[in-house]
Image (spheres, rainbow, N blue to C red):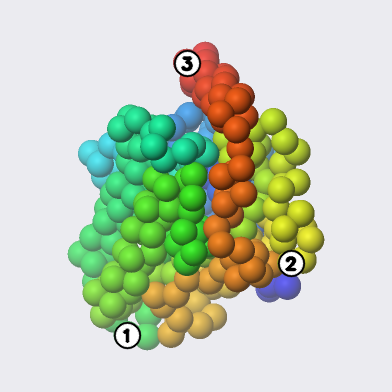
């Protein structure tokens, strides 16, 4: 639906761009002519993704291994990116989540999510934004865009995923606040709250032991989950400078599910202690496999 080379001249950083939804968006932006930078904790995964995307689309993709919970590491990465050529746009996609009764959360478990989602997103946004502001901007020049992935739970609450719901709400507040504060610098900020679009990592932590998307299909007004292409199309529009007066907005894309339901995980209140124990075991096993992959 978009013109070829729509993003020619753009340079876009996608956090968490090595896998899942981030990889999908990076691929779409690259196919439209953008130069791409992707980052993630597993540099080798990002490097492999960069090679595959360039083989598929051509263009330039640069991979960075960084833990966005580390503010100094984030600033060093962004400085390196700008020294090569300034970014034009930023996509805050990196996140983490898992289901748990809130009373069973440990401080470490809460921080594992909040430090990535809230703190990490702020660190990246500030590091990029302050460099745009320092470089200057004049009316009539192309605007910069920050697009953040949030969740529909910021509208109706997130039982059993409270650290994520709290942290994503903080990102929405950051989006609205900076849309006002940074508008005079030619910076727009918007957010997308996608419904369930199955990806391997998150499906194993949010729906352990079940078919990815099965629960969402059963309750969604459209009777299905979303697709990466649908997210890619919306993200492309928000970064396209096709409507520069659009800023400070959160667009929910979930087939109407958040309007029809009282929270995506409300039905988990019916789980027995045995079911929660099984879910925790599956999540911990997945976390162990991820740690082994990072170490190996």
Q: Which mark is residue 295?
A: 3
Q: Which numbered disc, 1 or 3, marks the residue that appears first in the sequence?
A: 1
Q: Which numbered disc, 2 or 1, marks the residue that appears first in the sequence?
A: 1
Q: Nearer the viewer, mark 2 or mark 3?
A: 2
Q: Nearer the viewer, mark 1 or mark 3?
A: 3
Question: Label 2 crowding class (10 Å Cα cut-off): few <14, some 14-19, many 20+?
Answer: some
Residue 247 % position (x, y)? 41, 77
Q: Quadrant of residue 200?
A: top right
Q: Can residue 251 be seen from the camera position used here?
A: yes
Residue 286 lies, with reference to residue 203, above or below; the image says: above
Q: Which numbered disc, 2 or 3, marks the residue that appears first in the sequence?
A: 2
Q: Quadrant of residue 53?
A: top right
Question: Label 3 crowding class (10 Å Cα cut-off): few <14, some 14-19, many 20+?
Answer: few
Q: Can residue 49 be seen from the camera position used here?
A: no
Question: Label 1 crowding class (10 Å Cα cut-off): few <14, some 14-19, many 20+?
Answer: few
Question: In this view of the protein, which residue sits in the foreground, 45 or 227?
Answer: 227
Residue bearing the label numbered 1: 139
């Amino acid at each position: 639906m978009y013109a070829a080379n729509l993003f020619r001249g753009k340079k876009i950083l996608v956090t968490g761009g090595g896998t899942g939804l981030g990889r999908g968006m990076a691929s779409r932006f690259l196919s439209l002519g953008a130069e791409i930078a992707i980052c993630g904790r597993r540099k080798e995964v990002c490097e492999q993704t960069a090679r595959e995307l360039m083989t598929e689309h051509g263009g330039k993709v640069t991979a960075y291994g960084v833990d966005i919970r580390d503010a100094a590491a984030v600033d060093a990465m962004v400085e390196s990116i700008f020294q090569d050529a300034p970014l034009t746009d930023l996509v805050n996609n990196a996140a983490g989540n898992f289901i748990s009764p809130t009373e069973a959360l440990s401080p470490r478990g809460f921080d594992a999510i909040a430090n990535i989602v809230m703190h990490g997103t702020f660190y990246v946004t500030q590091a990029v934004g302050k460099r745009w502001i320092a470089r200057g901007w004049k009316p009539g020049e192309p605007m910069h865009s920050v697009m953040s992935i949030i969740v529909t739970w910021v509208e109706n609450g997130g039982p059993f995923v409270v650290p994520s719901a709290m942290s994503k709400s903080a990102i929405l507040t950051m989006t609205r606040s900076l849309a006002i504060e940074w508008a005079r610098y030619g910076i727009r900020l918007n957010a997308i709250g996608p419904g369930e679009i199955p990806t391997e990592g998150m499906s194993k932590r949010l729906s352990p032991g079940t078919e990815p998307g099965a629960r969402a299909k059963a309750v969604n007004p459209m009777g299905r989950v979303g697709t990466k292409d649908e997210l890619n199309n919306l993200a492309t529009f928000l970064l396209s400078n096709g409507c520069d007066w659009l800023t400070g907005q959160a667009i929910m894309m979930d087939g109407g599910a958040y309007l029809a339901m009282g929270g995506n995980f409300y039905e988990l209140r019916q789980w027995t202690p045995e079911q929660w124990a099984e879910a925790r075991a599956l999540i911990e096993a997945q976390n162990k496999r991820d740690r082994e992959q990072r170490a190996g």
